[in-house]
Image (cartoon, helix red, strand yellow):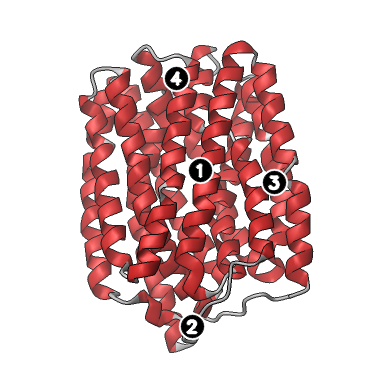
Amino acid sequence: MVLFGGSTGTRAGKTALRFVLMIGVVSFFADFVYEGGRSINGSFLATLGASGAIVGVVAGLGELLGYGLRFFSGRISERTRQFWPMTLFGYFIQMAAVPALALAGNWQIASVLIVLERVGKAIRNPPRDVMLAHAGKEMGIGWAFGLHEGLDQAGALIGPLVLAVILAHRGEYRIAFATLLIPACITAVLIVVTKFLYPRPEDLEPHTPEMHAAGLGRAFWIYLVGAALVAAGFADYQLIAFHLQKHGIASAIWIPIFYSVAMATSGAGSLLFGKLFDRFGVTVLIPLTLISIASAPLVFLGGFRLALTGAALWGLGMGVHESIIPAAVAAMVPAERRPSAYGLFTAAYGIFWFLGSAAIGFLYDVSILAAVVFCVVTGAASLPFFFAVRRKMATR
């Protein structure tokens, strides 16, 4: 069953491919910045005196705003059809917040900047994903999001490695954060250039959407519940980094390397599973969810090698979050409803990520095993919903 044929051999397909590649290069440098920062945020907060509960709440609050505010950015972009201004504004906020961590003197200020970075992502993601979806209708939605995520995660791989080298030689978090100002400036320049090269990505859509789009559909709502459960049971890497440092499982140098390994599996998986999504649809989410569920026991209960394996599986789960899940939303709703669909979907996703992260953080302070059980049970609970969505999509 081929859900989306797509082609990059036609002139329109080549234009769509160039746009996706350009956005991918922007994301490469952007992820270099904010994923580099996220790889050491948890351990940085620990050095500033934060507890496991604080790290969990900060991470969860960041994801709550980072996803919840997308409801508003999605609605606004759908109403105005002005995708670029919000995309640019969001990128600029993100690229300013992360290097500013070099100036944070306590965990409170650092927490505000960590959350602000997530807010920037919330502003720019729905309109950017809509633009990618327009290109994806020409070249294959799964492939468009998978290719973009592959480039995105390449930056997420290199950024933490660079920070690991800096920490190995200088041993100072502030120097590591300050170094990220360089790729942050490159990101800002590239996204402006992309805007001028492709001012109307919606023109990449091979067919003009209907002006009066239908509703979101039952499959969308079932899928939202399943994805929300996945989000609730997915531990944030900031808590993982906190755990690795607190229990001496990995040194400050190795923690960002663990994150790089996770980003490598995420990027490679995105390329493969993007193609598989175009071939098999949401069915690919079922085995991927089962695999990612195994990350929590390995990371929180294992030693160095098992934790490293768990980090790789955690990265595979992140690849699903960032590529296959938005591709599936684009497949379920009419083109005219995509901005609000992305906003609504990711708002619910963020609320459950926040509630889950906070719960995991509090459970962690009481019992690490209880936190792991919560992650596994909540993730497994999503599977019946994905099976139901698969049946719904098969009958369309």
Which mark sits nearer the N-terminus, 1 or 2? Answer: 2
Residue under numbered circle 2 = 209
Q: Nearer the viewer, mark 2 or mark 3?
A: 2
Which mark sits nearer the N-terminus, 1 or 3? Answer: 3
Is 33 left, or right, of 273 in this rendering? left
How many angstroms separate mark 4 from mark 1 (CA)? 18 Å
Q: What is the count of numbered marks?
A: 4
The image quadrant that residue 324 belongs to is bottom right
Q: Secondary structure at mark 3?
A: helix
Q: Which mark is residue 289?
A: 3
* Residue visible at 54% across and 56% down in the picture: 323
Q: Secondary structure at mark 4?
A: helix
Label 3–label 4 contact, CB within 8 A = no
| Label 4 Cα neighbours within 10 Å, binned few <14 / some 14-19 / many ≥20 | many
Above/below status of 59 relative to 192: above
* Residue visible at 32% across and 19% down in the picture: 107
Residue under numbered circle 4 = 54
Q: Secondary structure at mark 2?
A: loop
